[in-house]
Amino acid sequence: MTGEELAGLLEPTVERLGYELSDLEVKLGARNGIVRVFIDHPDGIGLDDCEKVSLAVSALLDVEDPIPGHYDLEVSSPGLNRKLTKVEHFQRFTGETVKVQMRFPIEGRKRFRGELKAADDETIVVEVDGEPHELPIATIDTARLVPDGS
């Protein structure tokens, strides 16, 4: 099962509990694997929120059994340097400083750090040193918020 398929399986349960599935990391190994579920809520995320989602997701994974072998489940908030993985994330954090790593060079570079100026369904605009750069969302490898003061 791919990460996208697993996210599709988990998202309805997470949303039914009142949270957003912000990101998902799956690292499976020969001995132990890990499934990290990142949840978000407009009021923030606390330990009780993580516990509630962990219990529900764990039960779902036990029933569906989509992942072979042994793995640990972790549920947490996205944190200050959260990954931006959805169009809605880019739109929500317009005006913030971001760090973007592209899969392929755009304008001769793969890394962009600057203010997120705009986002639509296909591209984001990041202003670096006063110059706007249009970056196709489909070719972004990773994008993260840069916490204030970093």
Image: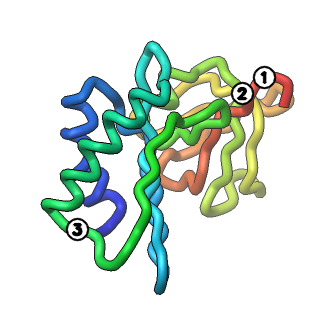
- Which residue in the protein does label 2 denote? 97
On-image quarter of the C terminus: top right
Q: Position of residue 142 (x, y in %)?
A: 60, 51
Q: Secondary structure at mark 2?
A: strand
Closer-to-camera residue (101/27): 27
* Residues at discs 3 and 2 in contact (Cβ within 8 Å): no
Q: How would you rate the neighbour count of disc 2 (Cα within 10 Å): few for under 14, some for 14-19, many for 20 or more?
A: many
Q: How would you rate the neighbour count of disc 1 (Cα within 10 Å): few for under 14, some for 14-19, many for 20 or more?
A: few
Q: Position of residue 122 (x, y in %)?
A: 43, 40
- Give the CA distance from mark 1 to mark 2: 8 Å
Q: Position of residue 69 (x, y in %)?
A: 34, 78
* Residues at discs 1 and 2 in contact (Cβ within 8 Å): yes
Marks 3, 2: nearer the viewer: 3
- Which residue in the protein does label 1 denote? 148
- Give the CA distance from mark 1 to mark 3: 39 Å
Q: Secondary structure at mark 1?
A: loop
Q: Position of residue 97 (x, y in %)?
A: 72, 27
Dot 1 or dot 2, earlier in sequence = 2
* Residues at discs 1 and 3 in contact (Cβ within 8 Å): no
* Residue 68 visible in this rendered orientation of the protein: yes
Marks 1, 3: nearer the viewer: 3
- Which residue in the protein does label 3 denote? 66
Q: Is residue 95 above or below residue 89?
A: above
- How is the structure coloured here? rainbow
Q: Is residue 11 above or below residue 7?
A: above
